[in-house]
Image (cartoon, rainbow, N blue to C red):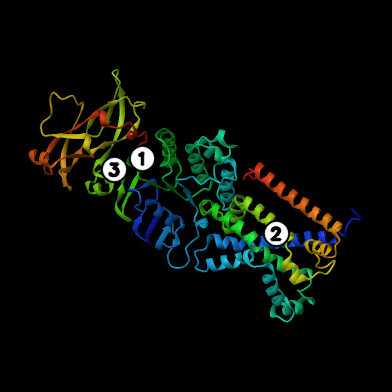
Amino acid sequence: MAGLSVDIALDYPGFALALSHDFPARGLTAVFGPSGCGKSTLLRVIAGLERGARGDVRFDGETWQGAGRPTPPHMRGVGYVFQDARLFAHLRVAGNLRYAARRARRAGARPDEAGIIAALELHDLLERRTTTLSGGQRQRVAIARALMGAPRLLLMDEPLAALDAGRKAAILPLIERLRDSAGIPIIHVSHDLSEVARLADHVVMMKDGRLVRAGPVAEVLADPDTASAVGVREMGALMPARVLRHHDDGLTELAVSGGRLLLPQIAAAPGTALRLRIPAHEVILSRARPEGLSALNILPGIVTGVHQGAGPGVIVKLRVGEDDLLARITRRSAEALALRPGTDLHAIVKSVSIAQADVSTAAV
Amino acid sequence: MTALPDLGPLWLSLRLAGWATMILLVVGTPLAWWLAHTRSRAKPVVEALTALPLVLPPTVLGFYLLVVLSPQSPVGGLWRDVTGTTLTFSFSGLVVASVLYSLPFAVQPLQAGFESVGRAPLEAAALLRAGPLDRFFTVASPLALRAYLTATVLSFAHTIGEFGVVLMVGGNIPGRTQVISIAIYEHVETLNYAQAHTLSAILLVFSFVVLLAVYAANRRFPIHVGG
């Protein structure tokens, strides 16, 4: 196993982290959970910044922490993007980048300096003082600086959390490109599910310092048992889709494995692969094929599970084509429809409810 | 105003302050670094010891130094055996005394400087493959540059202005231990007001110009130190 493998424990007054997991050696793994669940602390343990951590951390055949002295952070070859950027105030943007590149070269690596500057669109910022940058610019520089260090593993601690929606939207595609081209595993901490749905190949879901569920992103997000960590209102399955054509009335037709969907205009060329996140509370279920409804998007499916939660709601898991879909309905409706595994159903997806932010342009 | 006074004591004071400041920066940096970063329970003890010269009457500090540095004590005796000279009533003894006397003026600004730099940029540097010394010289020091400037000026100025400790440890030997403050005192004692005036004025103008230069520089170059 060439990836990262951790089996660690850390105790602070009022907080305990205990987690064991083998991270995939490729792609972007999102560590997701509510604030204070220990996501960032996990990242700091991996980087070697938490001296109180016990247990094992191994990467690519090396033991970073185990029996004996832990490998100090500067010897691990880890890149780290902090939530607060942490640019060096005494250096300009170019100086910050050079700081990383010089030390990477000393360690025998060859960072593609021009390529990184181009990828993060930093040409016009190189001579700026870091104190004059906007939040989004600071994070772009921080990501570029981490890459200049030619890391073998990139850790990102909520780099977008402090940004407004517009700046976030400008950086997300850059991270997507990074995920697809960097060729190193990335661990990305986030408490924003739409960000996770958009970026992640794998998800590690945490709550109260412990792992709740881990696996491929579509599988984890379609698992009703994660409701306690995600929050019932946030539940929603991922569905890969492809743009078919744009209609004259402003709708875009998408192909999913279980049929067709019509969504308000998506700015992507026909053929583009997308990820849709369909919130569970935006799905209505019907046993008969509905007639005379204003909703456009109706997908046939089979019930694969009915999960009771606390309160009046249940989460129904459906198989639609080759993908999973979650629907949140009341227990009374579930009983009225006599839902059980194997029941044939029609899922009505309220087209306007699919948020544009959740429509990713990444290949699935 | 009569003839120019003997400027020897002024040069001696400058030489003493120069040496003391240099040694203080070298010794004070690791001490301030430790105080800024340690979680040891010994920290308040060390902080209190470092701050003692601020509150002790110089005569008390001077008295203890006289005892410790004298050839009869282990420290002073060792020095005499190694170098063949005594620490009391010598320039070397004055340097030792000045370093102790001005210690808080170097350590406290440096400690505050390192604390305000904090761990965050050092962690960032470590994760860009910078080792501990590398981090200190390329991140912590430049970010604490203003603290270094303050520590240097305060140590230097405070050493120039000392009187009691120097008198106790060094006495008043012209050309060896007679620094400017003692020379002025002696001129006054011998009713030689003209010379006392001249030396005092030199010290006053010198101190003001140094402080003015520092504050002006501090204002014009806040923290940026290169690209």
Residue identified by numbered label 1: A195
At mark 3, the secondary structure is: helix
Label 3 Cα crowd, 10 Å radius (few <14 / some 14-19 / many 20+): many
- Mark 2 vs mark 1, CA separation in Å: 58 Å
Identified at 28% across, 46% down, the residue is: A230
The answer to which quarter of the image holds residue B162 is bottom right
Closer to viewer: mark 2 or mark 1: 2
Label 2 Cα crowd, 10 Å radius (few <14 / some 14-19 / many 20+): some
Chain holding disc 2: B
How many discs appear?
3
x, y percent for residue A320: 20, 37
x, y percent for residue A126: 58, 37
At mark 1, the secondary structure is: helix
Labels 2 and 3 positioned on one and the same chain: no
Identified at 80% across, 68% down, the residue is: B177
Label 1 Cα crowd, 10 Å radius (few <14 / some 14-19 / many 20+): some
Identified at 26% across, 45% down, the residue is: A231
Residue identified by numbered label 3: A218
Labels 3 and 1 positioned on one and the same chain: yes
Task: Name the amino acid type tagged 1.
Answer: Glu
Instruction: Using the rendered image of the protein, determine whether residue B132 is visible from the camera's viewpoint.
Output: yes
x, y percent for residue A171: 44, 36
Identified at 30% across, 32% down, the residue is: A355
Label 2 close to label 3 by CB (< 8 Å)? no
Question: Is B158 positioned to the left or the right of B142 in the image?
Answer: right
Residue identified by numbered label 2: B158
Task: Name the amino acid type tagged 2.
Answer: His
Chain holding disc 3: A
Q: Earlier in the sequence, mark 3 or mark 1?
A: 1
At mark 2, the secondary structure is: helix
Instruction: Using the rendered image of the protein, determine whether residue A3 is visible from the camera's viewpoint.
Output: no
